[in-house]
Amino acid sequence: MSANATQFLETKPFRSIFIGLAGVFLLIGAFRLAGYQPPPTLPSDPASQMRELQVTDSEEGSVTVRDVKTGETIVQYQRGQGSFFRATLRTLVHDRMRKGLTLDGNFRLETHMGNQLYLIDEVSGKALAMNAFGPANTAVFAALMSNQKKGEGL
């Protein structure tokens, strides 16, 4: 290495820049190791299929999912059924509470190019890429898109 290059590498501005960049990479790595995932963004292509869902809980512990447009009951999960569905909706409702938003509001399922399925909370705007949860869990929500009642718990 030449003398000029060695002198440059030993300067205070270079060391400051190097330490700053190293800190940024360490911070990003720490966030990733802690489980931070950037929120998925919806594709720019229009949805090929869409269904707006109204979800209601009963005092006996059942959860009813209805099509907002038709009022049709799509599926009803009894106590102990629909664990993945319940956990997913609980996550979205918890996000609403944390942000101080209303707990009432609908959810929207959208299918995009390549059969990518998204669950969107219409209150918070949060979107979940359902395909990321594996085929069996994706199938629970995919069944809600069709008119066939083949979801978990039926």
Image: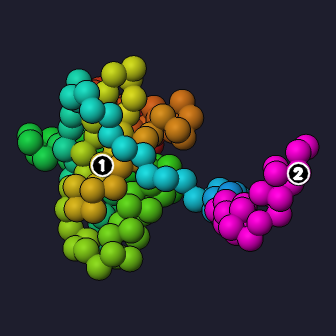
Q: Amino acid at mark 1?
A: Ile
Give 117 or 56, whichever is nearer the viewer. 117
Against 147, is 33 above or below? below
- The reply to whether the C-beta atoms of the residues labelled 1 and 2 are less than 8 Å apart is no
Secondary structure at numbered mark 1: strand
Residue at left offset 37%, top offset 44%: 41
Q: Which mark is residue 120?
A: 1
- Total marks in image: 2
Q: Residue at x 28, y 40 (%)?
A: 109
Q: Nearer the viewer, residue 73 or 128?
A: 128
Q: Residues within 10 Å of mark 1 (few under 14, many from 20)?
A: many
The C terminus lies in which quarter of the figure? top left
Establish if 62 lies above or below 147: below
| Front one among 71 and 47 | 47
Q: Is residue 75 visible?
A: yes
For the magenta stretch, what is the residue range? 1-24
Seen in the image, is 51 located left or right of residue 126? Answer: left
Instruction: Please name the residue that numbered disc 2 is placed on.
Output: 3
**Which of the numbered marks, if any, corresponds to residue 44?**
none
Note whether 144 is above or below 12 in the view shown.
Answer: above
Quadrant of the rendering where the N terminus is positioned: top right
Residue 5 lies in the magenta-colored region: yes
Name which residue lies at 77% across and 57% down: 8
